[in-house]
Structure formats: structure tokens, C-alpha cells
Image: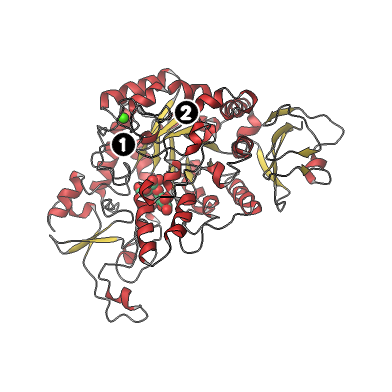
Amino acid sequence: PTDLPWWTNAVVYQIYPRSFADSNGDGIGDLGGIRQHLDHLVHLGVDVVWLSPIYRSPQVDNGYDISDYQSIDPLFGTLDEYDALLAECHARGLKLIMDLVVNHTSDQHAWFVESRSSLDNPKRDWYLWRDPVDRSGVAGLDPADAARREPNLWNSVFSGPGWQLDETTGQYYLHIFAREQPDLNWANAEMRDAVYSMMTWWLDRGVDGFRMDVINTIAKIERDLVGESRGYVMGPQVHEYLHEMHERVFAGRDAQLITVGETPGATVDDAVAFTAQDRGELDMVFQFEHVGLDHGPRTKFDNIPLALPALKASLARWQEGLADRGWNSLYFGNHDQPRSVSRFGDDGAFRYESATALAGILHLHRGTPYVYQGDEIGMTNAGYRSLSDYRDLESLNWAADELATGRPLDDVLDSLAFRSRDNARTPVQWSAGPGVGFTTGVPWLAPPASASTVNVQADLAAGSRSIVEFYRRLIALRHSSAVVRQGRFELLEPSHPALWAFTRTLDTSRLLAMANLSGAALPLDGLSLARAQDPGADHPVLLGNYAPTVAAESLRPWEFRVLALD
Ligand code: TEU
Ligand code: CA
């Protein structure tokens, strides 16, 4: 028996609808395609499905630019189809959560159309409008910055200035993402009320919670909005807003719901403040420390090598930091990150072994694991070598800026082939063939060549080398083990360059998880975990990615094992 909420024992599966399954042959995934594959999710054993946005949207940022929150974009289907999908999920014991994107709307949203229409429109203050600034007299600025008239010197995450001049009123509006994604003004209570009533509308429809897009950027600091501020800083009001949201929207049904906030840049202390249950804010957050370790100093597109000890230490820091208060999400991949088997594993000779080793290690940490569509079959980076294959505005805008500086195309393509968000957005490979079982039409984004051998059909026929089967057993282990769910985490051999090993302890029960994240055999003698295993005893192996799994004195390349010590 435990007083931990249900989602501490749950596994979430992220669907990026545009790339999951297409049921009408237009080459874009849709709700019909999802309904056709729900049994795949049931087979995996996941508990919750998170849908990336499917609301009406001009699709500038693939649906993260919403023009009507209470609708379904015709690309994906209708509200009736949505209700059918929700009912079918619930009938299968799956919960369904939606992606809440309320740091910004689309510039086509009725709220923004009204807000921009005049200085005294009632919704003017629902967005962040500020007058131009003349900084020609400001010392210490380079000529380019001194000439800028934007209210402050923030840049957009998607390149260019973070402000757009609106000719009609002569003011700038803030957009930390694309200019088609104007930031909402959370200081405005009327705007907040409209968001809360929209959220309640979805919960009343039966939705089981939300993933909240960049929810820690909703609180801007007024003094930073004008003047020489160069970097965004999270305003402390964010906790006030999230607590108000909790009271106004979640209270009374909080126990059945799951909420996860995406909080780029959040520290462990921020995450405790967001997720400690007595705070009444969020259940958990997506933090970005581990997925920032291989970013260069200038931009994420400057890929730098990642040493395993740094990755191990990062996850261990978050295990320790949220051990007593708060709760961790556990993820390596999503629709914004490179494919984890290409980034952290070996997507060539040891694709099966490394995909399963990474999943085993991640899922045996303390927290709620998130499986990103396609990772359950070890899908790999697309690695396109032609700019015309890319679709993501973040990638295309960055590449254009880089090429404009004279950087060689091949060099830019090297960066994109590893880091572009399109790498994780290629259609789920259900089978071989031109439409990879995703569509009977032309996929909106080109599947990589690997699809001919990397696909669900081939994986399910792979017997002891099926990645889906490994995930199924891993998820079953989580569901059955109180130690996995709540055991205390302790990292072993932190500085070892290839070994990732840790224990989980609950009362007198202990598990030992270990993986060899290298392509060479790894002898275990002399290492702390060998001592932890009471050499004499023969510890049962609960799960391993090599068959037959034996508690040997060494780990084979990319081998993962978890043992029950007591
Ligand atoms: O991403 C927020 C975020 O962290 C971005 O900075 C994103 O990770 C980018 O790739 C970093 O370089 C969320 C969504 O997940 C993303 O798909 C959207 O594009 C973005 O917000 C705007 O809604
Ligand atoms: Ca379609």
C-alpha cells in the first residue's frame, strides 16, 4: 500500500499526431490513424497517451500555433472523431491528455486579431504590446543592437528578433517563438479566465490532464520587457498563476488527473516549487538539463560530444533533488529532440542493444517515464543531407542565418542531420514499403532509409531481439514493483566512462540496474556493483536485453541487466 498518486506508477506514450498514422491518404497523420493503432499502445502496456496539438492551427509550428483551442484542425479530423478516440482510449483503460499551449496563440487566433486591431481594443492587454525604444544613446551596444528599436534585445528561439512591429498601431508585440506565435499576457486576469474556462471545457469533455507547453515562460518580468534586457528570466508570478490554475481548474478532480509542465531551463529548486504536492501546482515537469549537455555554447545546433559520466550525474542530481519533495518525469526523446538511439546509443551495429539499454536505464530511475512514438522500435535520426528535405521552421530559419554568414552548406547539414527536430518527426514506421505503413499517400516528411528494416512489423517478428517486447516487459516490471516505483536511487561508479549502474532501495528490497553503454565488453570484477552483489549469492535477473540473460562477471556490448539483490 502506498499513498503515492496513481501517476507515480504510470507510463506515458507521446503521440505526435502528424507523424503517427494517416487514415485518409493525404500523407499527414490523423485521429483515424491513431484509432487504428490503439491496440499497439495497449500491447506496450502504457497507461496514458499524450497528444501533441490537434487544435485548429495554421501549422506554422506544426500545431503549436493555435487559432482555436476548442476545435480540431480538419487535418486531424473532427470533434466527433476526437470524442470517439477518447471513448475508445477509456474503453481500453488508457487515459488521454492534451497539449496545452498557452504561453502564446497563433496570430490567426480571434483574440490576437482583436488585440492587434487598435490600441484601445478590450483585448489589447491580452498580449504583450510595447512602444519602440530609441537606444541610439545607450553606451556599450554594438552598432547593430544600438540601431534596434524593439522594446528589448530578446531574440526569438526560432531566429531573428523576439518582437514584431505592427504597422497599424506602431507598437511591437512579443513572440519568443515564431512571429506567428504572439505571447499571451498572463498578467491579465481576463485572459487567464478565458484559458481556465477553455481548460475546464476539455476536462468536462473527459480529458485526463495536460502537458503544458513552455509553461515557465508565461510570467515575464515587466522591467525586462523594455530596455536593454538580453535574456528571458522566469518571473516569480509563474507559481501564483499555476496555483490559481490548480484551484480554478483542477481542484476537486485533481486525483484522477495528470499534469506535466514543460519547463526549459528550470532548476531542481524550481522543479520542487512546481511539483511538491503541497504546492498545488503541477504533478511533474520536463526539465532540460540532460538534453542540453551536448549543446555547444552558441546554439543547440553546435553539437558537442557527451561523456557518459555527465549524463549519469545529471539524472542522479534530479533523482536526489526530488527524492523527498516533488516528482521527476523521465524522458530521453520527444518531438523536439534527436532520436535517442542515434544521440545516446549506437544506431548502427548495436541498435537493438542500445535502444533497449537506454530504455531500461531510464525507466528504472524514480519518476514517470515518457515513451516517444517510434522509440519502442528504435527509430533512428533521419539525417537528411538536403535542405529541401527539412520542414521544421526552427531548422530552416537557423540554416538560412548560418548560410547567410557564409558557412558551407555541408557544415550546416552536418549540424541539422544530428540536431534538427525533423529527425524525430518522421512518420512512425509500421512496416516496410514506400509509405512505411504510415500512409497510402506521400508522407509529409520523408522516412529515412532505415525504415526498410526498422519498423513495427519487423520488430514484432524479431523474437528475443524485439524492442517492443523489451518495452512491454520493462513496463510490466514497473507496474509490478514497488521498488521501481518508489525505491531510493543511488548511483554507483559515477566516473566510469561506459558503465551506468545504480541501486533502488525500498525497506529491505533492493534492485541493481546496470548497463554497458559501449561497444566493447565490460568486465565487472573490482567494481562496486560486483561487491553490491554479494558474489556468493545467485541473484535473479528480472530483465535483460541479451538472451540468455545470465548474471555474468562482465557486460556484453550495450548489455542491460536488472537484478533483485534482496
Ligand atoms: O518547445 C519549447 C522548447 O523548449 C523549445 O525551445 C524547443 O525545444 C526548441 O526546439 C528549442 O530549440 C515547445 C514545443 O515542444 C515545441 O515543439 C514548440 O515549437 C515550442 O514549445 C513553441 O510552442
Ligand atoms: Ca491524414
Give the residue at x 33% y 68%. 153
Where residue 150 sits in the image (x, y, percent)?
26, 67
Give the residue at x 28% y 51%. 181
Ligand 2 position by quadrant: top left
Between residues 223 and 74, which one lies in front from this camera angle?
74
Q: Which circle marks residue 199 in the picture?
A: 1
Is residue 506 visible from the viewing direction of this image? no
Circle 2: residue type: Ala
Between residues 330 and 187, which one lies in front from this camera angle?
330
Q: Quadrant of residue 62?
A: top left
Image quadrant where one finds the N terminus: top right
Give the residue at x 26% y 38%. 69
Q: Which circle marks residue 432 in the picture?
A: 2
Image quadrant where one finds the C terminus: top right
- Per the image, label 2 sits on a secondary structure element best described as loop
Q: Residues within 10 Å of mark 1 (few under 14, many from 20)?
A: many
- Per the image, label 1 sits on a secondary structure element best described as helix
Q: Residues within 10 Å of mark 2 (few under 14, many from 20)?
A: some
Q: Which circle marks residue 434 in the picture?
A: none
Give the residue at x 80% y 43%. 524
Where residue 30 sits in the image (x, y, percent)?
33, 30
Judge from the rendering whether residue 395 lies leftward or rightward of residue 326; answer left or right: left
Judge from the rendering whether residue 418 lies leftward or rightward of residue 141; answer left or right: right
Judge from the rendering whether residue 204 lies leftward or rightward of residue 341; answer left or right: left
Is residue 443 visible from the viewing direction of this image? yes
